[in-house]
Amino acid sequence: ARLERIQRNSAFLAGLGLTGKNRIAEQVGSDGTSVVKRSYKKRERRNGGPKRKSSRFENKERIVYAEAKSNRLRRSKEEIEQDRLDAIDRREKRMIRAAEEVKATVRRKEVRRLQRQELEIERQIALQIQRQQKQMKRQQREEEKAQEAKLKEQQRENMTVLKALL
């Protein structure tokens, strides 16, 4: 069972491209320079001290840093100046973009506020129209009642006149 587990683990590590005694994984960053290294060797704790990395790992790390440093030194003054100018350009573009985003946000907020105002005005107008319609209906009802009362009064008068004649 133990042998089976070891084989399974080593097959898994081989699938990741990590083989050999130290099993160091190298990953190249997107810019092609930064190298991230991980040691998958079990680090022992000697009498409660820190986990130790293998010396081969440290040496390899040192070599990578040395190469990066020499590459930096090899660059000319013009390249360095150009890099500095590019960085400034990027920073300015970022600032401009941020300012534009702020403006756009303000504009959006203003548009939303105006839309809300328009909706509120439309609602007020609708309410006013409803009120006017109600008032008109009320007036009509009152006029109809008054007319009915007049008619009844006239009928009563007619009846009294008829009775008087009979």
Image (tube, rainbow, N blue to C red):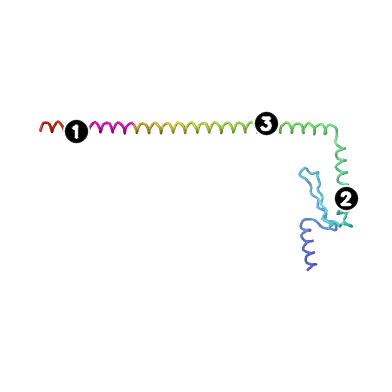
Q: Is residue 166 above or below residue 65?
A: above
Q: Residues within 10 Å of mark 1 (few under 14, many from 20)?
A: few
Answer whether labels 1 and 2 touch (C-beta < 8 Å).
no
Q: Is residue 98 left or right of residue 53?
A: left
Whether 150 is among the magenta residues is yes
- Mark 3 or mark 2: which comes first in sequence? 2
Q: Position of residue 112 (x, y in %)?
A: 56, 33
Residue 156: numbered disc: 1
Kind of residue sitting beneath label 3 = Ala
Residue at 54% x, 31% y is 114
Q: Nearer the viewer, residue 11 or 135?
A: 135
Circle 2 packing at 10 Å, graded few (<14), some (14-19), many (20+), is few
Labels 3 and 2 touching (C-beta < 8 A)? no
**Which quadrant would the N terminus be assigned to in this image?**
bottom right
The mark closer to the camera, 1 or 2, is 1
Q: What residue sits right under mark 2 in the picture?
A: 58
Q: Residues within 10 Å of mark 3 (few under 14, many from 20)?
A: few
Alpha-carbon span between mark 1 and mark 2:
121 Å
Q: CA distance from mark 3 to mark 1?
A: 85 Å
Quarter occupied by residue 79:
top right
Q: Earlier in the sequence, mark 1 or mark 2?
A: 2
Mark 2: amino acid: Glu
Name the residue at the bottom extreme.
Answer: 1
Mark 3 or mark 1: which comes first in sequence?
Answer: 3
Report how many numbered discs are placed on residues in the image.
3
Is 109 on the left or on the right of 121, as rendered?
right
> In the drawing, what numbered circle is on residue 99?
3
- Rendered location of residue 165, percent (x, y): 11, 31
Query: Over which residues does the magenta segment extend?
Result: 139-156
Viewer-proximal residue, 82 or 116? 116
Out of 16 and 147, give the one closest to the viewer.
Answer: 147
